[in-house]
Image (cartoon, rainbow, N blue to C red):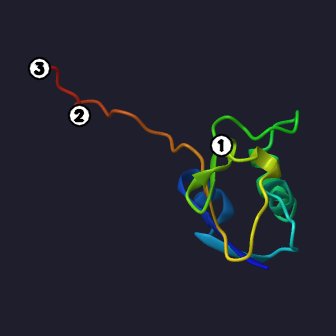
Amino acid sequence: MKVLVRFYANLREFMGKKTLELEVEEGTTFEGLLNQIPELRRKLVAEDGRLQDNVSSLINGRNIRFLNGLKTEIKDGDIVAMFSPAAGGLSEGTYTAS
């Protein structure tokens, strides 16, 4: 099965690419997908095995936290999007109180 992984914000910079197409076996979970990308797994999964709180991962637009988390099954043709919050906020002089 083929899965398209899209990287956004800091993860795009970290991975050095916008997308990655992976071949996965039927029954692969999100965790199994991460196991195929070890450098990304180390960045996204905490030492206790949970997904880092500051990471959002979507499968076909649905947040995996509201599905089965790391155990969410991946299907052929799925689009996985991974976001890590970008640094930012208000710059000096961009906010005016009325």
- Residue 66's label in the rendered image is 1
- Residue 98's label in the rendered image is 3
Q: Given the image, on which type of amino acid does mark 3 rest?
A: Ser
Left or right of 56, for residue 69: right
Q: Where on the picture, by quarter, is residue 55?
A: top right
Q: Mark 2 highlights which residue?
A: 94
Marked residue nearer the N-terminal end (3 or 1) = 1
User: Is the N terminus in the top left, top right, bottom left or bottom right quadrant?
Assistant: bottom right
At a point 16% along the width and 20% down the height, the residue shown is: 97
Separation of marks 1 and 2 at Cα, in angstroms: 35 Å
**Where 24 falls versus 67 (above or below)?**
below
Where residue 98 sits: x, y (%)? 11, 20
Circle 3 crowding by C-alpha within 10 Å: few under 14, some 14–19, many from 20: few
Element marked by disc 3: loop
Element marked by disc 1: helix
Element marked by disc 2: loop
At a point 76% along the width and 41% down the height, the residue shown is: 51
Q: Where on the picture, by quarter, is residue 85?
A: top right
